[in-house]
Image: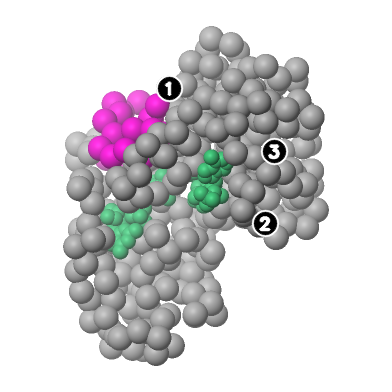
Amino acid sequence: MKSLIIGGAGFVGSYLIRYLQEQGQEVAVTKMPQETIAAPGADQYDLNILEKDSIMDLILKLQPDYVFHLAAQSSVGLSWKNPQMTIDVNIKGSVNVLEALRKAEKRPKTLLIGSGEEYGAIRPEKLPVSETNALKPENIYAATKACQNMFGRIYAEAYGLSVTMVRAFNHIGPNQAPMFVVADFCRQTAEIEAGKRDAVLKVGNLAAERDFTDVRDVVRAYALLVEKGTAGETYNVGSGHAVAIDTILKMILSMSDKEIRIEKDPSKFRPVDVPTIEADTKKLYEATGWTPQISLEQTIRETLDYWRRRV
Ligand code: A2R
Ligand code: GDD
């Protein structure tokens, strides 16, 4: 079997390449021209998803069995600062991918990666949130992913494309960019331990509750879903348990010997930050049998150790 990963130079891509190769698959991967990927055995192609014809050429050339569309502007925080770019990449780029798939001779099974953020503020009695819950995105990123989801369903129904949609909740682990909360707090802690900054850890909204899963469990779910998911359907991918950011912070601090002071940084707060996002993963379980295997403590410890080695 041959997989094409679009946007494979990012956080999830590096793990997905390795996982699919371990499963015996042939893997091709696209990256932005300025990016590098350390992935022996995977064929690499430069591709900007805003260039529609290039996607089509690549899919026609490779004729993959599976396509994983990971390319995105993936940060909620950055989406407030750069809405146009987020909309271009996440909506126009995704439609470009769908158009390329529509014109492909051999139509691959495809996974589009959306977000638990698409639900927006969820009524407490609706938690954990299932895929049938109404979408009310509360930030630019979430709106673009809700839009991508709608296009995915439309293309599946109108053109018979084998496109399955994921709503991924927070995923974490070593090698994640420090614009996301766990990597950010672990990097700051490692820098404090190494004497590279004062013993003050800057934080944003600690009251938010999010559903965290180790990235290695996440890519395993993607590989199962691309094969077993139903075209036109959406599946939540998360742990099923929301944890307060404050609890995450305390876990990280408990893993360090340093005395660290916490300071609120106004620039880290967002115009809107929904209180709780928690996934109902019954549909995913019923389709694939997937359950997460790596504990929150293990993934946080490994992320902290990763930053200790890096700083
Ligand atoms: O922005 P860069 O240079 O870091 O590249 C990102 C790439 N990307 C693009 N690829 C092709 N054409 C574009 N116009 C374009 N713009 C950005 O997509 C990066 O290498 C990749 C996304 O990786 P990450 O930001 O690390 O996201 P992650 O955590 O791997 O998430 C994968 C998917 C995304 O759709 C997220 O929105 C979702 O899972 O949570
Ligand atoms: N980044 C960051 N930095 N977030 C902080 C901080 C901080 O210093 N302090 C508190 N937070 C809070 C944010 O306000 C948010 O409520 C929560 O921590 C998680 O923020 P992020 O790690 O930036 O992730 P995200 O939830 O906005 O988005 C991630 O998860 C989505 C799925 O739920 C990304 O991986 C998205 O691509 C993904 O779709």
In the image, the segment drawn in magenta is 127-147
The relative height of residue 211 versus residue 282 in the rendered view (above or below) is below
Could you give the CA–CA distance between mark 3 and mark 2, rounded to whole angstroms? 14 Å
Residue designated by label 3:
4
**Residue drawn at (19%, 62%), measured in percent from left and top?**
266
| Label 3, ligand 1: CB separation under 8 Å | no
Residue 251 locus on image (x, y percent): 34, 72
Contact between marks 3 and 1 (CB within 8 A): the answer is: no
| Percent of width and height locating residue 3 | 72, 38
Tell me whether circle 1 and circle 2 mark residues in contact (CB < 8 Å): no
- Looking at the rendered structure, the kind of residue marked 1 is Met
CB of mark 1 near ligand 1 (< 8 Å)? no
**Residue plotted at (71% across, 20% down):** 104
* Amino acid type shown at disc 2: Ile
Neighbours of disc 1 within 10 Å: few (<14), some (14-19), many (20+): some
| Residue found 76% across the figure and 25% down from its top | 60
Q: What x and y, as percent, mark residue 198?
A: 30, 86
Q: Nearer the viewer, residue 12 or 254?
A: 12
Q: Look at mark 2 in the image and give the residue it sits on.
A: 37
Compare marks 3 and 2 and give the one earlier in the sequence.
Answer: 3
The answer to whether residue 93 is left or right of residue 56 is: left
Q: Amino acid at mark 3?
A: Leu
Name the quadrant of the N terminus: top right
Q: Is residue 222 above or below residue 293?
A: above
CA distance separating discs 1 and 2: 31 Å
Query: Which mark identifies residue 150?
Result: 1
Residue 293 lies in the magenta stretch: no
Secondary structure beneath disc 2?
Answer: loop
Residue 199: percent from left, percent from top: 29, 85
36 or 301: nearer the eye? 36
Sequence-wise, the earlier of marks 1 and 2 is 2
